[in-house]
Image (cartoon, helix red, strand yellow):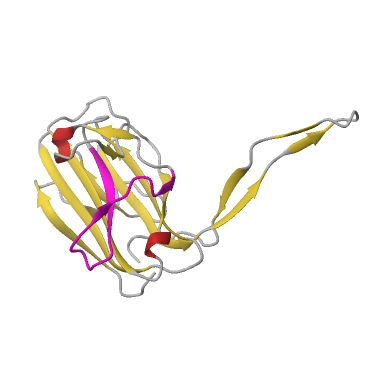
Amino acid sequence: GSANWSVGFQEAEGFNLWNNVQLESNSDFTAWYVEAVAETSRQSLVFNNLEVSGADPVLRFWHMINSAPGIDGGYVEISNDGGNIFVRMDDEFIKNGYDGGLAYGTFVIPNLNAFSGANDEFIDSYIDLSAYNGQTISVKFWFGTDGEVDSELPGTFPGWFVDDFELLDLLTHRAAACISSAEGDDACTDPSETVVNALPPSSTSE
């Protein structure tokens, strides 16, 4: 990515703003966090001036969402024109994509897939950026609530944590396992693809 990337906020509705906090994190001590509140809210966190390059460029981020399933949740958008027009990412996820549909009233968007539900650990999600190779992009994380917070959610902090956000040139290994018998019979599994991480994550504060 570019050395001059920046972070910002857009189109906020409500007072549960994104903050860099020390409540939970995937690595080091801080992560970006937006709280799930018992009122209507829509908040966005934007990373700007990200230069996409490589043979198979991807966006990887670690995150943990703890929200009323199907009601409160978040999704990701990308812009390649300086933030004027954003495109919602969906099929571009190649690992750990959205959990399912989100209620229409949360963002007033029909058939919206999003991250949502009760989770108690960070997972890594990957977005294929090959369509943006050679371009400078902005990435926006939207989180919305529709007036309900589930008191039975695990953990202490309802909402969405995002950590270790970075651009990578994806390295994968594709292989199948096979066995052979003395009688000459062969059997193989379906090919599987393993993601190989070449670099350690960087803190959101760096």
Residue drawn where x is 29% and y is 50% of the image: 76
Answer yes or no: is residue 176 visible.
yes
Quadrant in which the N terminus appears? bottom left
Above or below, 80 relative to 3: above
- x, y percentage for residue 124? 43, 47
Among the 4 quarters of the image, the one containing residue 2 = bottom left
Residue drawn where x is 39% and y is 71% of the image: 134
Residue drawn where x is 39% and y is 42% of the image: 97
Q: Residue furthest right?
A: 182
- x, y percentage for residue 80? 28, 65
Whether 84 is among the magenta residues is yes
- x, y percentage for residue 122? 40, 43
- x, y percentage for residue 199? 52, 62
What segment carries the magenta color? 73-95
Answer yes or no: is residue 37 visible.
no
Above or below, 5 relative to 39: below
* Foreground residue among 165 and 23: 165
* Foreground residue among 107 and 151: 107
Whether 184 is among the magenta residues is no
